[in-house]
Amino acid sequence: MQHLITTDDLTTKQITQILDDASRFKLQKRPVSLLKNKLLFTLFFENSTRTRSSFEVAAKRLGASVAHLDPSKSSTSKGETLEDTFLNIAAMQPDGVIIRHSDNALAQKFANFELTPLLNAGSGNFAHPTQALLDLFTLKEHFGNLEGIKIAIVGDIVNSRVASSAIALFGRFGIKISLVAPEQFMPHNVDLPKFEKLKDVLDDVDAVMSLRAQLERHNKPIFEDYETYASHYCLTKENIGDKNIIIMHPGPVMRNIDISDEILSDPRSKVLTQVTNGLFVRMAVLKLLLLDS
Ligand code: ASP
């Protein structure tokens, strides 16, 4: 049984297959119902705008059906343990469960039961594998060859599962990563070039991935005022100028703190392309896990 908890669960051959299938799905007007009669369950204990709907649309485009458990209305609020909730969902014999939770280890723990394929849709600050895959796809689509591409990850890196998964995945494809953040947002256990100032990297990168402050994971306010933070880290017309770089962000974007309105609507911004690509990448992931494995 194949799970997707981190991108390390995938061989390089499987990742290449996902990228190829996603390209094919993107070109097809009417994808075939490869997953007809399959049923997926979503179990989102944290908010989501893009990921949950992207998984749902991906499943439906492939002919699968999707059931949702809304944790705020489920028996976890009556005192049922998370484990029992999961075991009850698994007892309905879905073909896969898509889970998001603030606990870094929960998705892996449920995967270890080997009851149903587990797809991690975001676990704490630990991993968000489909985001990293769609980011990789977006880079490949734009640059063609990934080897040697230089990307700066900017923002609240230490609290971001998007950053964790990007760091784990991109290096496997020869992408060179640098990290840009104030001290409070910089991870210390990651061996990559680190910069405090955006201007020190912007002339030497092909892409910038901006990340919002993960306020829900801050135990106490880290910055009182995000305007000062923005004056150093926001991607603007002034600091991007006419540089030949692409701008990425997993969303939700904090407008004019992470990226200015002007740069968000600049053709170099791939933020909505990432969302479109996410759909095709998730279709490819579902095909791999539910059909090919
Ligand atoms: N949507 C992404 C996540 O779930 C990024 C974010 O929330 O900042 O991690």
Image (cartoon, rainbow, N blue to C red):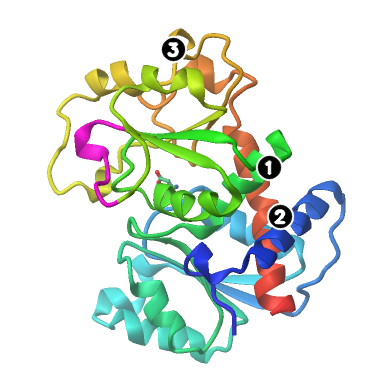
- What amino acid type is highlighted by mark number 2? Leu
- What amino acid type is highlighted by mark number 3? Asn
Whether residue 83 is visible: yes
* Residue under the point 82% across and 68% down: 33
- Location of the N terminus by quadrant is bottom right
Query: CA–CA distance between discs 1 and 2?
Result: 9 Å
212 vs 56, left or right, is: left
Q: Earlier in the sequence, mark 1 or mark 2?
A: 2
Q: Position of residue 156 (x, y in %)?
A: 31, 39
Q: Camera-side residue: 1 or 273? A: 1
Residue contact at pointers 1 and 2, CB within 8 angstroms: yes
Q: Is residue 61 above or below residue 113?
A: above
19 vs 249, left or right, is: right
> Label 3: which residue?
239
Q: Camera-side residue: 283 or 156? A: 156
> Label 2: which residue?
19
Determine crowd level at label 1: few under 14, some 14-19, many 20+ residues with C-alpha closer than 10 A: some
Q: Position of residue 43 (x, y in %)?
A: 45, 69
Query: CA–CA distance between discs 1 and 3?
Result: 25 Å
> Label 1: which residue?
140
Q: Position of residue 128 (x, y in %)?
A: 46, 57
Tag 1 secondary structure: helix
Q: Which residues are magenta?
A: 181-189
